[in-house]
Image (cartoon, coloured by chain):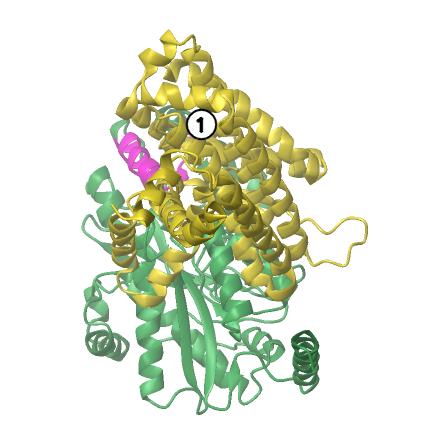
Amino acid sequence: MTKRAQDGVEGLFARPRGAAVRRRMGVAALIVALVLALSLPFTMSGFRLFQFTQVLIYAIALLGLNMLTGYNGQFSLGHGAFYAIGAYTTAIMIDRWNIGYGWTIPVAGLLCLGTGFLFGRPALRLEGLYLALATFSLALAIPQILKYFEHWTGGSQGIVLSKPKAPFGLPLTEDQWLYFMTLAVTILLFILAWNLLRGRTGRAIVAIRDNHIAAEAMGINNALYKSVIFGVSAAYTGVAGALSALAIAFVAPDSFNVFLSITLLTGIVIGGFATISGAIYGALFIQFVPNWAQDISKAAPWAIFGVFLIVFMYVMPRGIAGFLQLLWIRLTASAVSREQGR
Amino acid sequence: MSLFTRFLALLLVSGLAGAGGAAAQTVVGVTPTEIKIGHTNPYSGPASAYGTIGKVITAYFKKVNDEGGVNGRKINFITYDDAYTPPKTVEMVRRLVEQDQVAFVFNTLGTPTNTAIHKYMNQQKVPHLFVATGATKWNDPKNFPWTMGWQPNYQAEGQIYAKYVLKNVPDAKVGILYQNDDYGKDYVKGFKDGLGDAAKKLVVSEQSYETTDPTIDSQILNLKGSGANVFFNVTIPKFAVQAIKKAHDIGWKPLHLLNSVSSSVGVVLRPAGLEASRDLLTTYYIQDPTDPQWKNLQGYKDWLAFMKKYYPEGNLEDAFNVYGYSVAQTLVHVLKQCGNDLSRENIMRQAASMKDLALPMLLPGIKINTSPTDFAPIEQEQLAKFDGERWVLFGEIYDASKK
């Protein structure tokens, strides 16, 4: 094994002595990404900015799903339902009760936390594919349930909202303000997720996925952790849904069909299973690749999309995040060896 | 000059150039040789049966371009898939308006999808022409002066049934079954408006259902019990089948008016039973390509030749292909009428001043009329009776806009 490759393997599984320099470079990369994210509103057209707002919204939803499916090993084909519940919570609160949109986002999150937790309890009895099917039923049912409560949801006609305007007389367009608000929520939720997943809780969650009997033997309350992570995951997705209702300024049952849930699952697999940054790559993928596919071929865009999927899976078996991590280790190897040489 | 100042200078210059362009009042999406038109349609997803409309429109504009375009300009038709999901429609329409810089948006399909962009189009002041949905709200020039429908809306159709009843059923007692949402209520409102003051006296029973109800049997029993001799059936296909069957099974034989939403022989009448469906009435405004009586007319022959040359994979029995052909012809008419002024204001003005436009594949006698206060292009329809095998047109052309 060459020195480099050895470094790479070590970089993955252990903390080599070069960890400090890698971390410094990682922080630098993060700052660059942040500056880039903050500069987008002043360099992009309204339409592009709207697309990137959607990317951030998807990223929140994907992070939520990845906590459940990637980290905890519970498969969900029904997260579109929580996305819908979040979106409708916001829409109904604004439309029926005239509540300020800012308040509706945490309420949507809390409501989904509760719903997710409650759904997580009975789902404890279901493993793997059976859980996937149970959650799939949720995704199938939600568009019809939304039509049933027509008095609240506006039935199949949905609810039309107004786009939020920038507060305090800030000189921002609606698109810019939405983007900044979404970015702030995204950053907050990513930091929270990072805190949750890197500590004791995170290790417990991963341990349950890897071997639930061993985890139980270690004194981890499997049932509690599994339902709590279900709730947290649903809450993230619900917040994403709430933001999407504001960004689109319209909700209708047709916005939350089964395909949404499948898209979200595609996003976490492509982005990188059980990674935090993977949520962003996955979001970029599900936002932009279908559009490119359509630009390439009008006749069979989904066939092209399928080809993209297969190529990504083949070239990057650990998702985009895994691929970039390997690339990162290679790129920083020289800096690390310089550090070690000193 | 440092890189930064150079960047600033570049920004300034491009900003000035942008301002200069705006001052010169260039018309968005229009050049001396081209006009850009935007469109969304569900080419994929559960509603992809409508996808053929986008394809037939694309084919028709190709034919127009082959023949030299409109007033010397070629039509650049940009159509995107929205899979019938409102968020995707919003994204794609914003792409059309802000990035592709189309002159206007045309025939976007679906009620929820168009609802999602309704406000946006009117805020941006971009024409949102001839949307492919039957809701009545597209005819609201006061509040939404940039949006216009095309096909007869539900209220107009309701009015036409009312006119028929007033004229032909002397002692009418009407029972109504309707879906409890905007679609159903639109029909009922149109019907009652059409009856006018007599509505209170003539309508003896109104029953509603939710799309989530398993059956509507009890509603049908109630309607029969009310002694109604006219049944206005405002239901989507699944419930229309049940209603026709149940009415037949319990031996209720009213004058049965079936909304055109559910007039498909294959989807509704055959499952309900062709014998049970005999003597149903519905409305038509467009020529059914399977109806033999049109086959020898020039309009049908031209359509057939067009289909064979420009859209050979299209289904010749699919009425959507007649729909797309006709709506595209309406647009070409408007563009011709615009002459050389293709500003958004003028496009809207011309769309709102169509006078007695007849199209080859609309029913003979049906004319398109609009005005600054009337954004409902087609308001005339003819009734058809089901003879146990197919719909047979009869009687005069009814006009919902005339009292």
Q: Describe residue B256's horizontal placement relative to residue A221 as left or right.
A: left
Q: Is residue B331 above or below residue A108?
A: below
Q: Chain of mark 1?
A: B
- In the picture, measured across the screen, residue A255 lies left or right of residue B246, that is right
Q: Does residue B131 lie above or below B62 as drawn?
A: above
Is any part of residue B156 visible from this angle?
no
Q: Is residue B377 magenta?
A: no
According to the picture, the residue beneath numbered tag 1 turns out to be B226
Question: Toward which corner of the image does residue A11 lie, by quadrant?
Answer: top left
- The residue nearer to you, when weighing A151 against A206, is A206
Extreme-right residue of the structure: A168
Residue found 37% across the figure and 30% down from its top: A76
Task: Report whether A176 appears left or right of B275.
Answer: right
Residue at screen point 40% across, 9% down: A218
Q: Looking at the picture, which amino acid does disc 1 mark?
A: Ser
Closest to the observer: B6 or A161? B6
Front one among A75 and B138 = A75
Q: Colour of chain B?
A: green
Query: Picture coordinates of residue B299 (x, y %)?
Result: 28, 77
Q: Is residue B243 magenta?
A: yes
For the residue pair A128 and A7, the one nearer the viewer reads as A7
Q: Colour of chain A?
A: yellow
- Could you tell me residue A14's position as x and y percent? 39, 33
Query: Does A170 appear above or below B231?
Result: below
**Quarter the C terminus of chain B occupies:** bottom right
Identify the residue at horizontal 69%, vertical 38% (top origin): A102
Q: Is residue A93 above or below residue B298?
A: above
Question: What stretch of residues is rendered in magenta?
Answer: B226-248
